[in-house]
């Protein structure tokens, strides 16, 4: 497509000078721009394609950046980025040193509030609105929530508080019936009913607008109409739920109709009370394959724009794929096994299980805390629940893990996908803290596999040998290419695996970092003349004290290696155990993620920056380890 309007758009002020036909042309150009870039570098595709017109209408009607727009989740904001001065850098999206794939306050004055997790926008926007009121200012605040975020409990906490505070706040519900997976639950059905009854709301809105314009008595007539309407609201008003919370409900409107959106926003933007504007959109709008398969096109990876063919990666299966096959096998073996996820059926690999065991599969929507407590209830009555959630999202359910599962010593299995660094999605999505927060929970068993065979073993161990809460954490992406045996044997709880021994140093590694440790040990021998052993710790909790005692006495300098924050992670667990065992004051040097949020970027770049590649690890160990073999070279300064 030839871009006729987009190159001239440097800020929303340029958008406000356009005519309606020009805005519609700009919407088409923005979609083409998203397709061209995301097809080459990846990203969250469907949500941003669906919200283009809503984005344009908001910036057209509001005086941004003075007026504040708070986006929920963040991955629906590509059009917002493009028209707020970042189009010339859009190709750097999610690249190392480039634009974030989500909202970041330090990236643009138009990003009013950072977002990467769901359901935060209403609470944050309400806080901004009250800050405005207390400062005696008059800017507008809008929250754009959608893409499944209305399934999260925090959204209703925000709505409840906003209705009682009765301050000027615009909430735009972008209803596309989807999160990562299709929206589920009673609220999703409720929104669908509202859309099917939308003729009533559209007629009511038009009638009210005309009545208000009657000279002298218009406003009084509207007030009287509202009183009459209240008595029949339950029968007539599909948006009664929001009105009962204290919001003025408008809609639903076609979220792709710019003329209608702009006209409505112009009328309601200055209301001095909470407004909920309900728009319905199509996820993936403007790209037929994405419209037809929105779950698949939520974040499809690289694809061919003309054909829609999605690039397939060669090589070993992903850890998620290995888990997907293993959980189906376990489901066949154990009829008590049930699975629970929070709006990420495809993401965590549960589609095959859901297909084979539909009555034993539960997608609770974007409600991680509920997922955990729901599973606890099932465990309390004899079922064996497996809760499958990304590491970054399990953070949101931490209290539920402690209070509802661990405190009652219930047998709930947490399969923690996307653990460690996830690359381009950045700090809101890195699984950097799960080892730290899970290992401090009393009674929790925490494991991490070095390869796909060990993942299958750990799942069997968690189901058969752990009477209480247990977590298995594994990374995003390809596994090691190790075949999974037909007969899977469980592991001994708390037993590490000694892969090699060395007198100069020992690398105590876990998960995907075991492969890095083995490669680093080879480099230490080849380049520095140092003999380093490698221990696959496997269990972060309970820690293998016997293995630690042995290497502390004979294994030279100790180094822990993990793709988790060094604060409270594997290295901390090792040092705590060494201190308690009193093995001559031995301590390990902790290598892992630093005590800061790690930026987005390609994984290879991030591991290089953090000095966690085999070469960097070998050099770091060599600098701190004296050679013991005769004739060996001295380590570099």
Image (tube, grey):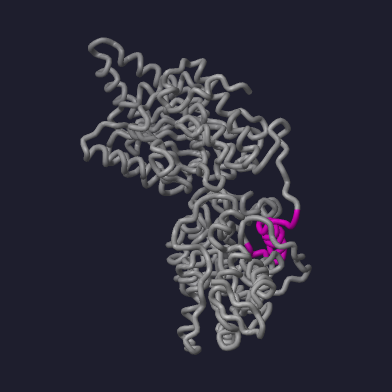
Whether residue 101 appears in this view of the structure is: no
Q: Nearer the viewer, residue 631 or 375?
A: 631
Q: Residue at x 28, y 30 (%)?
A: 272
Q: Residue at x 50, y 44 (%)?
A: 100
**Picture coordinates of residue 453 (x, y %)?**
71, 67
Quadrant of res 468: bottom right
Please tell me whether residue 211 is drawn above or below residue 301 in the rendered image: above
Relative horizontal placement of residue 292, taking residue 379 as reference (left or right): right
Query: Considering depth in this image, is 428 or 175 the residue closer to the camera?
Result: 428
Q: Is residue 122 left or right of residue 193?
A: left
The quarter holding residue 326 reads bottom right
In the image, the segment drawn in magenta is 315-337
**Rendered image quadrant of residue 165:** top left
Instruction: Please state, as top left, top right, bottom left or bottom right, where the N terminus lies in the image.
Output: top right
Q: Residue at x 62, y 42 (%)?
A: 42
| Residue nearer the viewer, 127 or 91 | 91
Q: Main secondary structure of the magenta part?
A: helix
Asked if residue 537 lies in the magenta stretch, the reply is no
Visible residue check, residue 593: yes
Percent from the top left, x then y, of residue 74?
Answer: 48, 42
Residue 116: x, y in percent? Answer: 48, 47
Q: Looking at the image, which residue sits at the far top? A: 215
- On the image, the x and y values in percent for residue 474 come to 61, 62
Q: Is residue 600 above or below residue 163?
A: below
Query: Is 320 within the magenta?
Result: yes
For this orientation, the residue located farthest to the right is 486
Q: How many marks?
A: 0
């Amino acid at each position: 497509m030839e871009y006729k309007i987009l190159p001239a758009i440097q800020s929303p002020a340029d958008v406000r000078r356009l005519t309606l036909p020009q805005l519609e042309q700009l919407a088409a150009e923005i979609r083409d721009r998203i397709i061209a870039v995301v097809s080459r570098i990846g990203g969250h595709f469907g949500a941003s394609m669906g919200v283009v017109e809503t984005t344009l209408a908001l910036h057209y009607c509001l005086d941004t950046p003075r007026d504040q727009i708070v986006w929920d989740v963040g991955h629906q904001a590509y059009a917002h980025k493009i028209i707020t001065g970042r189009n010339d850098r859009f190709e750097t999206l999610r690249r190392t040193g480039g634009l974030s794939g989500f909202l970041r306050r330090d990236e643009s004055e138009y990003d009013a509030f950072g977002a990467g997790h769901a359901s935060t926008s209403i609470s944050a926007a309400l806080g901004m609105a009250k800050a405005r009121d207390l400062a005696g200012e008059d800017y507008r605040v809008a929250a754009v929530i959608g893409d499944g975020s209305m399934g999260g409990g925090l959204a209703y906490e925000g709505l409840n508080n906003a209705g009682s505070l009765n301050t000027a706040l615009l909430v735009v519900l972008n209803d596309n019936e989807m999160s990562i997976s299709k929206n589920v639950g009673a609220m999703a059905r409720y929104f669908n009913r509202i859309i099917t009854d939308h003729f009533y709301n559209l007629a009511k809105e038009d009638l009210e607008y005309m009545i208000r314009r009657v000279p002298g008595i218009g406003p009084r007539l509207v007030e009287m109409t509202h009183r009459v309407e209240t008595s029949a609201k339950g029968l007539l008003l599909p948006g009664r739920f929001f009105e009962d919370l204290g919001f003025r409900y408008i809609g639903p409107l076609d979220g792709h109709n710019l003329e209608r959106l702009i006209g409505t926003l112009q009328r309601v933007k200055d209301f001095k009370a909470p407004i909920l504007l309900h728009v319905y959109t199509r996820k993936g709008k403007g790209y037929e394959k994405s419209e037809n398969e929105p779950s698949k096109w939520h974040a499809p990876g690289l694809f061919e724009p003309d054909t829609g063919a999605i690039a397939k990666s060669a090589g070993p299966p992903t850890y998620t794929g290995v888990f997907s096959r293993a959980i189906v096998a376990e489901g066949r073996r154990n009829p008590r096994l049930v699975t629970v996820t929070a709006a990420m059926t495809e993401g965590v690999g549960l589609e095959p299980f859901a297909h084979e065991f539909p009555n034993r599969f539960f997608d609770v929507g974007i409600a991680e805390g509920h997922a955990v407590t729901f599973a606890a209830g099932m465990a309390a009555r004899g079922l064996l629940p497996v809760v499958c959630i990304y590491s970054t999202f399990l953070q949101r359910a931490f209290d539920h893990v402690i209070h509802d599962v661990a405190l009652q010593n219930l047998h709930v299995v947490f399969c923690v996908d996307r653990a460690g660094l996830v690359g381009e999605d950045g700090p809101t999505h890195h699984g950097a803290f799960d080892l730290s927060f899970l290992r401090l929970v009393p009674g929790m068993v925490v494991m991490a596999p070095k390869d796909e065979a060990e993942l299958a073993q750990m799942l069997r161990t968690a189901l058969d040998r752990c009477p209480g809460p247990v977590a298995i954490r594994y990374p995003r992406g390809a596994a090691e290419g190790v075949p999974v045996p037909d007969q899977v044997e469980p592991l001994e709880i708390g037993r590490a695996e000694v892969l090699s021994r060395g007198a100069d140093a020992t690398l105590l590694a876990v998960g995907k970092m075991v492969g890095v440790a083995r490669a680093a040990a080879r480099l230490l021998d080849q380049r520095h003349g140092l003999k380093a052993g490698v221990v696959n710790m496997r269990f972060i909790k309970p820690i293998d004290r016997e293995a630690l005692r042995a290497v502390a006495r004979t294994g030279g300098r100790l180094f822990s290696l993990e793709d988790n924050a060094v604060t409270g992670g594997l290295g901390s667990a090792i040092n705590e155990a060494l201190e308690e065992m009193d093995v001559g004051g031995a301590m390990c040097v902790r290598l892992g993620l630093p005590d800061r949020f790690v930026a987005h970027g390609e994984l290879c770049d991030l591991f290089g920056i953090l000095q966690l590649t085999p070469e960097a690890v070998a050099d770091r160990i060599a600098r701190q380890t004296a050679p013991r073999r005769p004739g060996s070279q001295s380590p570099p300064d």
